[in-house]
Image: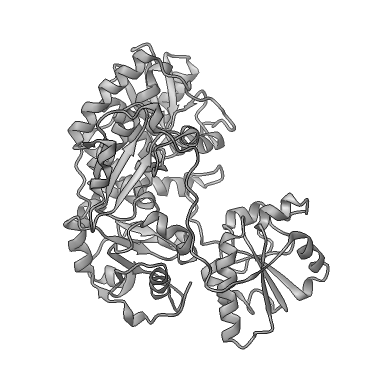
Protein backbone atom coordinates (compact mmCIF):
# COMPACT_ATOMS: atom_id res chain seq x y z
CA UNK A 1 0.00 0.00 0.00
CA UNK A 2 1.51 3.26 -1.08
CA UNK A 3 0.96 6.66 0.51
CA UNK A 4 2.66 8.74 -2.15
CA UNK A 5 -0.38 10.43 -3.71
CA UNK A 6 -2.98 12.76 -2.27
CA UNK A 7 -6.58 11.63 -1.91
CA UNK A 8 -7.64 14.88 -3.58
CA UNK A 9 -6.10 13.56 -6.79
CA UNK A 10 -9.08 11.24 -7.19
CA UNK A 11 -12.46 12.69 -8.22
CA UNK A 12 -15.66 11.89 -6.35
CA UNK A 13 -18.50 10.12 -8.14
CA UNK A 14 -22.04 10.30 -6.71
CA UNK A 15 -24.45 7.40 -6.39
CA UNK A 16 -26.59 8.65 -9.31
CA UNK A 17 -23.64 8.61 -11.73
CA UNK A 18 -22.60 5.08 -10.74
CA UNK A 19 -26.19 3.87 -11.10
CA UNK A 20 -26.48 5.50 -14.52
CA UNK A 21 -23.32 3.72 -15.68
CA UNK A 22 -24.64 0.37 -14.49
CA UNK A 23 -27.97 0.89 -16.25
CA UNK A 24 -26.18 1.90 -19.46
CA UNK A 25 -23.86 -1.14 -19.19
CA UNK A 26 -20.82 1.11 -19.32
CA UNK A 27 -17.77 -0.73 -18.02
CA UNK A 28 -17.49 -0.03 -14.31
CA UNK A 29 -15.60 -1.66 -11.46
CA UNK A 30 -17.28 -0.72 -8.18
CA UNK A 31 -14.81 -1.95 -5.57
CA UNK A 32 -15.32 -2.40 -1.84
CA UNK A 33 -11.81 -2.43 -0.36
CA UNK A 34 -12.75 -3.55 3.14
CA UNK A 35 -12.12 -7.09 4.30
CA UNK A 36 -14.64 -9.73 3.24
CA UNK A 37 -16.66 -9.90 6.46
CA UNK A 38 -17.63 -6.20 6.62
CA UNK A 39 -18.22 -6.32 2.86
CA UNK A 40 -20.63 -9.21 3.37
CA UNK A 41 -22.62 -7.28 5.96
CA UNK A 42 -23.81 -4.70 3.41
CA UNK A 43 -22.80 -3.56 -0.04
CA UNK A 44 -24.32 -2.50 -3.39
CA UNK A 45 -25.46 -5.28 -5.72
CA UNK A 46 -22.62 -4.85 -8.22
CA UNK A 47 -19.85 -4.11 -5.75
CA UNK A 48 -16.90 -6.49 -5.89
CA UNK A 49 -14.71 -7.13 -2.87
CA UNK A 50 -11.03 -6.32 -3.44
CA UNK A 51 -9.51 -5.91 0.04
CA UNK A 52 -6.84 -3.26 0.42
CA UNK A 53 -4.66 -5.98 1.95
CA UNK A 54 -4.47 -7.90 -1.34
CA UNK A 55 -4.61 -5.26 -4.08
CA UNK A 56 -1.10 -5.82 -5.44
CA UNK A 57 -1.72 -9.56 -5.67
CA UNK A 58 -5.20 -9.52 -7.23
CA UNK A 59 -5.70 -6.26 -9.15
CA UNK A 60 -3.97 -7.02 -12.46
CA UNK A 61 -5.69 -10.41 -12.73
CA UNK A 62 -9.15 -9.25 -11.82
CA UNK A 63 -9.07 -5.84 -13.54
CA UNK A 64 -6.84 -6.37 -16.57
CA UNK A 65 -7.40 -3.03 -18.32
CA UNK A 66 -5.51 -0.19 -16.65
CA UNK A 67 -7.89 2.52 -17.87
CA UNK A 68 -10.99 0.78 -16.48
CA UNK A 69 -13.46 3.17 -14.83
CA UNK A 70 -12.96 2.26 -11.16
CA UNK A 71 -15.02 3.52 -8.21
CA UNK A 72 -13.72 2.77 -4.72
CA UNK A 73 -15.26 2.90 -1.26
CA UNK A 74 -14.50 1.49 2.16
CA UNK A 75 -13.38 2.54 5.63
CA UNK A 76 -12.07 0.85 8.76
CA UNK A 77 -12.49 2.77 11.98
CA UNK A 78 -11.21 6.22 11.18
CA UNK A 79 -9.10 5.06 8.23
CA UNK A 80 -10.15 5.98 4.70
CA UNK A 81 -9.30 2.70 3.00
CA UNK A 82 -10.65 3.89 -0.37
CA UNK A 83 -8.07 6.67 -0.66
CA UNK A 84 -5.26 4.29 0.30
CA UNK A 85 -6.54 1.79 -2.27
CA UNK A 86 -6.70 4.46 -4.96
CA UNK A 87 -3.09 5.42 -4.29
CA UNK A 88 -2.01 1.80 -4.46
CA UNK A 89 -3.88 1.22 -7.72
CA UNK A 90 -2.36 4.38 -9.16
CA UNK A 91 1.09 3.04 -8.30
CA UNK A 92 0.19 -0.13 -10.25
CA UNK A 93 -0.62 1.91 -13.35
CA UNK A 94 -4.40 2.36 -13.11
CA UNK A 95 -5.40 5.72 -14.54
CA UNK A 96 -9.19 6.11 -14.19
CA UNK A 97 -9.71 6.05 -10.43
CA UNK A 98 -12.60 7.58 -8.51
CA UNK A 99 -13.94 7.60 -4.96
CA UNK A 100 -17.62 6.97 -4.24
CA UNK A 101 -19.01 10.24 -2.92
CA UNK A 102 -19.94 9.75 0.73
CA UNK A 103 -18.77 6.14 0.64
CA UNK A 104 -21.22 3.45 1.67
CA UNK A 105 -23.21 5.91 3.78
CA UNK A 106 -23.53 8.17 0.75
CA UNK A 107 -24.94 5.24 -1.23
CA UNK A 108 -27.44 4.51 1.53
CA UNK A 109 -28.42 8.15 1.98
CA UNK A 110 -29.09 8.49 -1.75
CA UNK A 111 -31.57 5.61 -1.58
CA UNK A 112 -29.28 2.91 -2.94
CA UNK A 113 -30.21 -0.66 -2.07
CA UNK A 114 -27.70 -2.60 0.07
CA UNK A 115 -27.31 -6.37 0.04
CA UNK A 116 -25.90 -8.87 2.53
CA UNK A 117 -23.65 -11.92 2.02
CA UNK A 118 -21.26 -12.72 -0.86
CA UNK A 119 -21.79 -13.64 -4.53
CA UNK A 120 -25.05 -11.72 -4.34
CA UNK A 121 -25.56 -11.11 -8.10
CA UNK A 122 -25.53 -14.85 -8.72
CA UNK A 123 -27.64 -15.75 -5.70
CA UNK A 124 -30.27 -13.15 -6.43
CA UNK A 125 -30.30 -14.26 -10.08
CA UNK A 126 -30.88 -17.86 -8.95
CA UNK A 127 -33.85 -16.78 -6.89
CA UNK A 128 -35.24 -14.88 -9.88
CA UNK A 129 -34.83 -17.99 -12.05
CA UNK A 130 -36.84 -20.09 -9.60
CA UNK A 131 -39.42 -17.32 -9.24
CA UNK A 132 -39.97 -17.02 -13.00
CA UNK A 133 -39.44 -20.61 -14.14
CA UNK A 134 -40.91 -22.40 -11.10
CA UNK A 135 -37.89 -24.70 -11.01
CA UNK A 136 -39.08 -28.08 -9.70
CA UNK A 137 -37.91 -29.07 -6.23
CA UNK A 138 -38.46 -31.71 -3.57
CA UNK A 139 -38.18 -31.33 0.18
CA UNK A 140 -35.50 -33.00 2.26
CA UNK A 141 -37.98 -35.52 3.64
CA UNK A 142 -39.19 -36.41 0.15
CA UNK A 143 -35.64 -36.95 -1.11
CA UNK A 144 -34.73 -38.98 1.96
CA UNK A 145 -37.73 -41.23 1.39
CA UNK A 146 -36.59 -41.85 -2.20
CA UNK A 147 -33.02 -42.62 -1.15
CA UNK A 148 -33.99 -44.81 1.81
CA UNK A 149 -36.53 -46.65 -0.30
CA UNK A 150 -33.88 -47.37 -2.96
CA UNK A 151 -36.07 -45.77 -5.59
CA UNK A 152 -34.85 -45.20 -9.14
CA UNK A 153 -33.10 -41.96 -8.20
CA UNK A 154 -29.67 -40.32 -8.45
CA UNK A 155 -28.56 -37.39 -6.34
CA UNK A 156 -26.05 -35.06 -8.01
CA UNK A 157 -24.10 -32.55 -5.90
CA UNK A 158 -23.41 -29.42 -7.99
CA UNK A 159 -20.81 -27.85 -5.66
CA UNK A 160 -17.02 -28.01 -5.83
CA UNK A 161 -15.62 -31.41 -4.91
CA UNK A 162 -14.02 -30.11 -1.70
CA UNK A 163 -17.38 -28.77 -0.53
CA UNK A 164 -19.02 -32.09 -1.37
CA UNK A 165 -16.32 -33.92 0.61
CA UNK A 166 -17.05 -31.81 3.69
CA UNK A 167 -20.70 -32.83 3.83
CA UNK A 168 -23.05 -34.44 1.34
CA UNK A 169 -26.41 -36.08 0.94
CA UNK A 170 -26.16 -39.87 1.45
CA UNK A 171 -25.64 -41.62 -1.92
CA UNK A 172 -24.89 -38.32 -3.72
CA UNK A 173 -22.30 -38.10 -6.51
CA UNK A 174 -20.16 -35.02 -7.08
CA UNK A 175 -21.00 -33.39 -10.42
CA UNK A 176 -20.02 -29.69 -10.32
CA UNK A 177 -22.61 -27.49 -12.01
CA UNK A 178 -21.09 -27.04 -15.47
CA UNK A 179 -20.63 -30.80 -15.78
CA UNK A 180 -24.29 -31.72 -15.29
CA UNK A 181 -25.60 -31.54 -18.86
CA UNK A 182 -22.46 -33.23 -20.21
CA UNK A 183 -22.42 -36.14 -17.72
CA UNK A 184 -25.97 -36.70 -16.52
CA UNK A 185 -26.67 -39.48 -19.02
CA UNK A 186 -23.68 -41.47 -17.78
CA UNK A 187 -25.23 -41.48 -14.31
CA UNK A 188 -28.90 -41.70 -15.29
CA UNK A 189 -29.10 -43.52 -18.64
CA UNK A 190 -32.65 -44.66 -17.85
CA UNK A 191 -34.95 -41.75 -18.74
CA UNK A 192 -37.26 -42.83 -15.91
CA UNK A 193 -34.59 -42.18 -13.27
CA UNK A 194 -35.44 -39.29 -10.98
CA UNK A 195 -32.54 -36.80 -10.93
CA UNK A 196 -32.05 -34.69 -7.80
CA UNK A 197 -29.60 -31.76 -7.84
CA UNK A 198 -28.33 -30.30 -4.60
CA UNK A 199 -25.89 -27.74 -3.24
CA UNK A 200 -25.41 -26.35 0.27
CA UNK A 201 -28.23 -23.84 0.02
CA UNK A 202 -30.29 -22.87 -2.99
CA UNK A 203 -28.47 -21.18 -5.89
CA UNK A 204 -26.44 -23.99 -7.43
CA UNK A 205 -29.34 -26.41 -6.87
CA UNK A 206 -31.67 -24.11 -8.78
CA UNK A 207 -29.24 -23.30 -11.59
CA UNK A 208 -28.16 -26.95 -11.93
CA UNK A 209 -31.72 -28.23 -12.03
CA UNK A 210 -32.84 -25.56 -14.47
CA UNK A 211 -29.81 -26.32 -16.66
CA UNK A 212 -31.04 -29.89 -17.06
CA UNK A 213 -34.60 -28.68 -17.67
CA UNK A 214 -33.44 -26.11 -20.23
CA UNK A 215 -31.33 -28.74 -22.00
CA UNK A 216 -34.40 -30.94 -22.29
CA UNK A 217 -33.12 -34.15 -20.72
CA UNK A 218 -35.94 -36.71 -20.63
CA UNK A 219 -35.59 -37.54 -16.92
CA UNK A 220 -37.73 -36.02 -14.20
CA UNK A 221 -35.49 -33.44 -12.47
CA UNK A 222 -35.83 -31.61 -9.17
CA UNK A 223 -33.68 -29.52 -6.88
CA UNK A 224 -33.24 -30.59 -3.27
CA UNK A 225 -35.09 -27.69 -1.71
CA UNK A 226 -32.65 -25.65 0.40
CA UNK A 227 -29.81 -28.13 -0.13
CA UNK A 228 -27.77 -29.49 2.76
CA UNK A 229 -29.16 -26.70 4.96
CA UNK A 230 -32.66 -28.02 4.37
CA UNK A 231 -31.43 -31.55 5.01
CA UNK A 232 -29.95 -30.58 8.39
CA UNK A 233 -32.92 -28.45 9.40
CA UNK A 234 -35.11 -31.49 8.76
CA UNK A 235 -33.04 -33.37 11.36
CA UNK A 236 -31.46 -35.68 8.80
CA UNK A 237 -27.86 -36.92 8.82
CA UNK A 238 -25.27 -35.91 6.23
CA UNK A 239 -22.33 -37.96 4.97
CA UNK A 240 -18.77 -36.74 5.44
CA UNK A 241 -15.73 -37.59 3.33
CA UNK A 242 -17.67 -39.06 0.38
CA UNK A 243 -15.66 -39.43 -2.83
CA UNK A 244 -18.11 -40.45 -5.53
CA UNK A 245 -17.45 -38.65 -8.83
CA UNK A 246 -19.11 -38.77 -12.22
CA UNK A 247 -17.28 -40.97 -14.73
CA UNK A 248 -14.42 -39.07 -16.34
CA UNK A 249 -15.26 -40.49 -19.77
CA UNK A 250 -18.40 -39.58 -21.65
CA UNK A 251 -19.60 -41.83 -24.46
CA UNK A 252 -19.62 -40.43 -27.97
CA UNK A 253 -23.40 -40.79 -28.13
CA UNK A 254 -23.97 -38.98 -24.85
CA UNK A 255 -21.53 -36.24 -25.79
CA UNK A 256 -23.23 -35.69 -29.13
CA UNK A 257 -26.65 -35.53 -27.48
CA UNK A 258 -25.38 -33.06 -24.87
CA UNK A 259 -23.92 -30.87 -27.62
CA UNK A 260 -27.22 -30.94 -29.48
CA UNK A 261 -29.04 -30.00 -26.26
CA UNK A 262 -26.68 -27.22 -25.13
CA UNK A 263 -26.28 -25.15 -28.26
CA UNK A 264 -29.95 -24.13 -28.62
CA UNK A 265 -30.00 -23.08 -24.96
CA UNK A 266 -27.03 -20.78 -25.52
CA UNK A 267 -28.54 -19.41 -28.71
CA UNK A 268 -31.84 -18.67 -26.99
CA UNK A 269 -30.03 -16.84 -24.18
CA UNK A 270 -28.19 -14.61 -26.66
CA UNK A 271 -24.72 -16.11 -26.41
CA UNK A 272 -22.54 -14.91 -29.27
CA UNK A 273 -20.15 -17.07 -31.28
CA UNK A 274 -16.74 -16.15 -32.61
CA UNK A 275 -13.77 -17.84 -34.22
CA UNK A 276 -10.81 -18.39 -31.92
CA UNK A 277 -8.50 -16.56 -34.29
CA UNK A 278 -10.82 -13.53 -34.15
CA UNK A 279 -10.78 -13.07 -30.37
CA UNK A 280 -8.37 -10.16 -30.70
CA UNK A 281 -11.18 -8.16 -32.32
CA UNK A 282 -12.99 -8.13 -28.95
CA UNK A 283 -10.07 -6.36 -27.26
CA UNK A 284 -11.12 -2.93 -28.53
CA UNK A 285 -10.08 0.30 -26.80
CA UNK A 286 -12.17 0.84 -23.70
CA UNK A 287 -13.32 -2.78 -23.54
CA UNK A 288 -12.26 -5.45 -21.05
CA UNK A 289 -12.11 -9.06 -22.18
CA UNK A 290 -12.04 -12.01 -19.80
CA UNK A 291 -11.09 -15.45 -21.18
CA UNK A 292 -12.08 -18.48 -19.12
CA UNK A 293 -11.67 -22.23 -19.54
CA UNK A 294 -14.75 -23.70 -17.86
CA UNK A 295 -13.59 -27.31 -17.71
CA UNK A 296 -12.37 -28.98 -14.53
CA UNK A 297 -9.09 -27.77 -12.97
CA UNK A 298 -7.51 -31.13 -13.79
CA UNK A 299 -8.36 -30.81 -17.47
CA UNK A 300 -7.11 -27.24 -17.49
CA UNK A 301 -3.78 -28.24 -15.96
CA UNK A 302 -3.33 -30.94 -18.59
CA UNK A 303 -3.54 -28.37 -21.39
CA UNK A 304 -5.54 -25.24 -22.18
CA UNK A 305 -5.93 -22.50 -24.73
CA UNK A 306 -3.24 -19.80 -24.50
CA UNK A 307 -4.33 -16.80 -22.47
CA UNK A 308 -7.31 -18.54 -20.84
CA UNK A 309 -7.66 -18.71 -17.05
CA UNK A 310 -9.24 -21.62 -15.21
CA UNK A 311 -12.80 -20.94 -14.02
CA UNK A 312 -14.93 -24.11 -13.77
CA UNK A 313 -18.29 -23.12 -15.17
CA UNK A 314 -20.49 -23.83 -12.19
CA UNK A 315 -18.35 -21.73 -9.87
CA UNK A 316 -17.98 -18.99 -12.48
CA UNK A 317 -21.75 -18.60 -12.62
CA UNK A 318 -21.83 -18.71 -8.80
CA UNK A 319 -19.00 -16.19 -8.30
CA UNK A 320 -19.34 -13.65 -11.11
CA UNK A 321 -18.64 -10.77 -8.73
CA UNK A 322 -15.25 -12.23 -7.87
CA UNK A 323 -14.22 -13.53 -11.29
CA UNK A 324 -15.56 -10.62 -13.35
CA UNK A 325 -15.57 -7.48 -11.20
CA UNK A 326 -15.82 -5.16 -14.22
CA UNK A 327 -19.54 -4.94 -14.89
CA UNK A 328 -20.14 -4.48 -18.62
CA UNK A 329 -17.02 -6.39 -19.67
CA UNK A 330 -16.89 -9.01 -22.40
CA UNK A 331 -16.40 -12.68 -21.56
CA UNK A 332 -15.23 -15.62 -23.69
CA UNK A 333 -15.75 -19.18 -22.45
CA UNK A 334 -14.11 -22.27 -23.90
CA UNK A 335 -14.12 -26.03 -23.41
CA UNK A 336 -13.29 -29.09 -25.51
CA UNK A 337 -16.81 -30.45 -25.91
CA UNK A 338 -19.14 -27.57 -26.79
CA UNK A 339 -21.39 -28.29 -23.82
CA UNK A 340 -19.91 -26.76 -20.70
CA UNK A 341 -19.04 -23.45 -22.34
CA UNK A 342 -22.47 -23.14 -23.96
CA UNK A 343 -24.39 -23.94 -20.77
CA UNK A 344 -22.24 -21.67 -18.58
CA UNK A 345 -22.47 -18.89 -21.16
CA UNK A 346 -26.24 -19.24 -21.31
CA UNK A 347 -26.45 -18.25 -17.65
CA UNK A 348 -23.99 -15.39 -17.93
CA UNK A 349 -25.91 -14.00 -20.89
CA UNK A 350 -29.14 -14.10 -18.88
CA UNK A 351 -27.29 -12.17 -16.15
CA UNK A 352 -26.65 -9.37 -18.63
CA UNK A 353 -23.08 -10.15 -19.71
CA UNK A 354 -21.82 -9.88 -23.27
CA UNK A 355 -20.54 -13.44 -23.57
CA UNK A 356 -18.98 -15.43 -26.40
CA UNK A 357 -18.09 -19.06 -27.09
CA UNK A 358 -16.02 -20.45 -29.99
CA UNK A 359 -18.11 -21.07 -33.08
CA UNK A 360 -16.48 -24.49 -33.37
CA UNK A 361 -15.22 -26.77 -30.61
CA UNK A 362 -11.43 -26.27 -30.37
CA UNK A 363 -9.40 -29.25 -31.50
CA UNK A 364 -7.07 -31.05 -29.11
CA UNK A 365 -4.06 -29.43 -30.77
CA UNK A 366 -5.27 -25.99 -29.66
CA UNK A 367 -4.79 -26.79 -25.96
CA UNK A 368 -1.07 -26.11 -25.99
CA UNK A 369 -0.40 -24.45 -22.62
CA UNK A 370 0.37 -27.01 -19.92
CA UNK A 371 0.57 -24.60 -17.01
CA UNK A 372 -0.97 -21.30 -16.13
CA UNK A 373 1.24 -18.35 -17.05
CA UNK A 374 3.10 -17.10 -13.97
CA UNK A 375 1.31 -14.20 -12.32
CA UNK A 376 2.92 -10.79 -12.65
CA UNK A 377 3.26 -9.05 -9.30
CA UNK A 378 4.69 -5.58 -8.74
CA UNK A 379 7.71 -5.16 -6.50
CA UNK A 380 7.08 -4.18 -2.91
CA UNK A 381 7.53 -0.47 -2.26
CA UNK A 382 10.54 -1.06 0.02
CA UNK A 383 13.19 -3.75 -0.33
CA UNK A 384 13.19 -6.01 2.75
CA UNK A 385 15.85 -8.51 3.78
CA UNK A 386 14.96 -12.17 4.16
CA UNK A 387 15.66 -14.57 6.98
CA UNK A 388 15.85 -18.34 6.61
CA UNK A 389 13.73 -20.74 8.68
CA UNK A 390 16.86 -22.00 10.46
CA UNK A 391 17.96 -18.49 11.41
CA UNK A 392 14.46 -17.59 12.58
CA UNK A 393 14.33 -20.70 14.74
CA UNK A 394 17.59 -19.62 16.37
CA UNK A 395 16.23 -16.12 17.04
CA UNK A 396 13.06 -17.48 18.61
CA UNK A 397 15.11 -19.02 21.39
CA UNK A 398 15.06 -15.44 22.72
CA UNK A 399 11.43 -14.63 21.87
CA UNK A 400 11.27 -11.26 23.63
CA UNK A 401 13.50 -9.69 20.99
CA UNK A 402 11.65 -11.02 17.95
CA UNK A 403 7.96 -10.88 17.01
CA UNK A 404 6.69 -13.06 14.18
CA UNK A 405 3.63 -11.65 12.39
CA UNK A 406 1.61 -13.89 10.07
CA UNK A 407 -0.50 -12.07 7.46
CA UNK A 408 -1.89 -15.21 5.80
CA UNK A 409 -5.63 -15.86 5.81
CA UNK A 410 -7.01 -16.32 9.30
CA UNK A 411 -8.29 -19.78 8.37
CA UNK A 412 -4.79 -20.90 7.45
CA UNK A 413 -3.37 -19.30 10.59
CA UNK A 414 -5.80 -21.25 12.75
CA UNK A 415 -4.95 -24.49 10.96
CA UNK A 416 -1.23 -24.14 11.61
CA UNK A 417 1.27 -21.38 12.23
CA UNK A 418 4.74 -20.79 13.60
CA UNK A 419 4.71 -21.13 17.41
CA UNK A 420 4.35 -17.72 18.98
CA UNK A 421 3.35 -15.97 15.73
CA UNK A 422 0.78 -13.20 15.80
CA UNK A 423 -2.04 -13.09 13.26
CA UNK A 424 -2.73 -9.69 11.69
CA UNK A 425 -4.62 -8.41 8.68
CA UNK A 426 -2.15 -6.55 6.51
CA UNK A 427 -4.25 -3.39 6.14
CA UNK A 428 -4.59 -3.18 9.94
CA UNK A 429 -0.99 -3.99 10.79
CA UNK A 430 0.10 -0.48 11.80
CA UNK A 431 -2.63 -0.17 14.43
CA UNK A 432 -1.78 -3.63 15.80
CA UNK A 433 1.89 -2.80 16.38
CA UNK A 434 2.43 -1.51 19.88
CA UNK A 435 -1.13 -2.29 20.96
CA UNK A 436 -1.97 -5.97 20.50
CA UNK A 437 1.58 -6.83 19.39
CA UNK A 438 4.16 -5.77 22.01
CA UNK A 439 7.10 -3.66 20.81
CA UNK A 440 10.05 -5.72 19.62
CA UNK A 441 13.57 -5.09 18.37
CA UNK A 442 12.81 -7.20 15.31
CA UNK A 443 9.69 -8.10 13.34
CA UNK A 444 9.59 -11.08 10.99
CA UNK A 445 6.70 -11.11 8.52
CA UNK A 446 5.40 -14.34 7.07
CA UNK A 447 2.46 -15.83 5.20
CA UNK A 448 1.90 -19.04 3.26
CA UNK A 449 4.51 -18.35 0.59
CA UNK A 450 6.09 -15.02 1.70
CA UNK A 451 4.42 -13.11 -1.18
CA UNK A 452 1.90 -11.10 0.84
CA UNK A 453 4.40 -10.84 3.68
CA UNK A 454 6.74 -8.83 1.44
CA UNK A 455 4.13 -6.14 0.93
CA UNK A 456 3.20 -6.17 4.61
CA UNK A 457 6.85 -5.86 5.61
CA UNK A 458 7.28 -2.87 3.28
CA UNK A 459 4.22 -1.26 4.89
CA UNK A 460 5.62 -1.89 8.35
CA UNK A 461 9.03 -0.52 7.43
CA UNK A 462 7.48 2.73 6.21
CA UNK A 463 5.31 2.96 9.34
CA UNK A 464 8.23 2.43 11.71
CA UNK A 465 10.39 4.94 9.85
CA UNK A 466 7.62 7.52 10.10
CA UNK A 467 7.52 6.86 13.85
CA UNK A 468 11.26 7.42 14.13
CA UNK A 469 11.94 3.74 14.81
CA UNK A 470 14.55 3.22 12.11
CA UNK A 471 16.63 1.00 14.39
CA UNK A 472 13.86 -1.64 14.56
CA UNK A 473 14.58 -4.47 12.15
CA UNK A 474 11.95 -5.77 9.68
CA UNK A 475 12.53 -9.09 7.90
CA UNK A 476 10.58 -11.50 5.71
CA UNK A 477 10.70 -15.26 6.28
CA UNK A 478 12.11 -16.70 3.05
CA UNK A 479 9.56 -19.07 1.57
CA UNK A 480 7.02 -18.27 4.27
CA UNK A 481 5.23 -20.83 6.39
CA UNK A 482 5.62 -23.47 3.69
CA UNK A 483 9.40 -23.26 4.03
CA UNK A 484 9.22 -23.32 7.83
CA UNK A 485 7.23 -26.55 7.93
CA UNK A 486 9.17 -28.09 5.05
CA UNK A 487 12.29 -27.61 7.18
CA UNK A 488 10.72 -29.83 9.83
CA UNK A 489 9.90 -27.19 12.44
CA UNK A 490 6.85 -27.57 14.66
CA UNK A 491 3.60 -25.73 14.30
CA UNK A 492 0.98 -24.27 16.60
CA UNK A 493 -2.77 -24.45 16.14
CA UNK A 494 -5.81 -22.32 16.92
CA UNK A 495 -6.50 -18.66 17.65
CA UNK A 496 -3.46 -18.33 19.87
CA UNK A 497 -2.46 -14.71 19.15
CA UNK A 498 -4.95 -12.61 17.21
CA UNK A 499 -3.68 -9.06 16.82
CA UNK A 500 -6.69 -8.18 14.66
CA UNK A 501 -10.14 -9.69 14.41
CA UNK A 502 -10.71 -12.42 11.82
CA UNK A 503 -12.67 -10.23 9.43
CA UNK A 504 -10.69 -11.28 6.35
CA UNK A 505 -13.31 -13.90 5.56
CA UNK A 506 -17.05 -14.00 6.01
CA UNK A 507 -18.21 -17.28 7.51
CA UNK A 508 -20.96 -18.59 5.26
CA UNK A 509 -23.89 -20.12 7.17
CA UNK A 510 -23.99 -22.98 4.68
CA UNK A 511 -20.38 -24.11 4.95
CA UNK A 512 -18.83 -26.45 7.48
CA UNK A 513 -20.80 -28.53 9.91
CA UNK A 514 -21.22 -26.33 12.97
CA UNK A 515 -23.57 -23.53 11.86
CA UNK A 516 -26.52 -23.08 14.19
CA UNK A 517 -30.05 -23.89 12.98
CA UNK A 518 -30.95 -20.24 13.57
CA UNK A 519 -28.14 -19.03 11.30
CA UNK A 520 -29.09 -21.51 8.58
CA UNK A 521 -32.76 -20.54 8.69
CA UNK A 522 -31.87 -16.86 8.65
CA UNK A 523 -29.76 -17.45 5.56
CA UNK A 524 -32.66 -19.15 3.77
CA UNK A 525 -35.01 -16.34 4.77
CA UNK A 526 -32.52 -13.84 3.33
CA UNK A 527 -32.38 -15.73 0.02
CA UNK A 528 -36.17 -15.76 -0.20
CA UNK A 529 -36.13 -11.96 -0.02
CA UNK A 530 -33.63 -11.39 -2.82
CA UNK A 531 -36.17 -11.09 -5.63
CA UNK A 532 -37.79 -8.20 -3.78
CA UNK A 533 -34.41 -6.53 -3.30
CA UNK A 534 -33.65 -6.88 -7.01
CA UNK A 535 -36.85 -5.04 -7.79
CA UNK A 536 -36.01 -2.21 -5.40
CA UNK A 537 -32.44 -1.91 -6.72
CA UNK A 538 -33.42 -1.87 -10.39
CA UNK A 539 -29.90 -2.24 -11.90
CA UNK A 540 -29.68 -5.99 -12.45
CA UNK A 541 -30.63 -6.24 -16.16
CA UNK A 542 -31.38 -9.96 -15.72
CA UNK A 543 -33.54 -11.77 -18.29
CA UNK A 544 -34.65 -15.36 -17.68
CA UNK A 545 -35.29 -17.53 -20.74
**Residue 408 in sight here:** yes
At x 57%, y 69%, the residue is: 456
Indicate the position of residue 212 as horizontal and vertical percent values.
31, 26
Observer-nearest of 10 and 134:
10
Residue 33 horizontal/vertical position (percent): 41, 65
Residue 445 % position (x, y): 64, 67
Asked whether residue 40 appears in the rendered view, the answer is: no
The quarter of the picture where residue 450 lies is: bottom right
In the image, residue 357 above or below residue 493: above
**Residue 465 located left or right of residue 225:** right
Q: Position of residue 525 (x, y in %)?
A: 36, 47
Q: Nearer the viewer, residue 471 or 279?
A: 279
Residue 183 location, quadrant: top left
In-image side of 396 versus 137 (left or right): right
**Total label count?**
0
Q: Is residue 187 above or below residue 345?
A: above
In this picture, residue 43 sits left or right of residue 469? left
Q: Is residue 278 above or below residue 256?
A: below
Q: Is residue 236 left or right of residue 221?
A: right
Frontmost residue, 259 versus 212: 259
Protein image colouring: one colour
Question: Quick one: quadrant of the C terminus?
Answer: top left
Amino acid sequence: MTTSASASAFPLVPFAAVRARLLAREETALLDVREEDPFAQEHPLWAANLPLSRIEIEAWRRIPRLDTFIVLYGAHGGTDLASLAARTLASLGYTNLHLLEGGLEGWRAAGGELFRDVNVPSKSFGELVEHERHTPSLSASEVKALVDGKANVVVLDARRFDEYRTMSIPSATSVPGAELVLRVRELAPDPATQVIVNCAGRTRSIIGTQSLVNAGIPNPVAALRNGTIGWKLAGQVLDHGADRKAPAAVSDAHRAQAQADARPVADKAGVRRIALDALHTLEAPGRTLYRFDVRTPEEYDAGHLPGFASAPGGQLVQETDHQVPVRGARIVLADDDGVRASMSASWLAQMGWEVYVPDAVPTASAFTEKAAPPPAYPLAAVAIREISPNDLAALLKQPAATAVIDVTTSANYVKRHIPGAWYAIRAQLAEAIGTAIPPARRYVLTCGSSLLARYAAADLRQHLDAQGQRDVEVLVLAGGNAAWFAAGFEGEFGETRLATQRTDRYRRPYEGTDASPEAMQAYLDWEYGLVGQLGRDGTHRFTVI
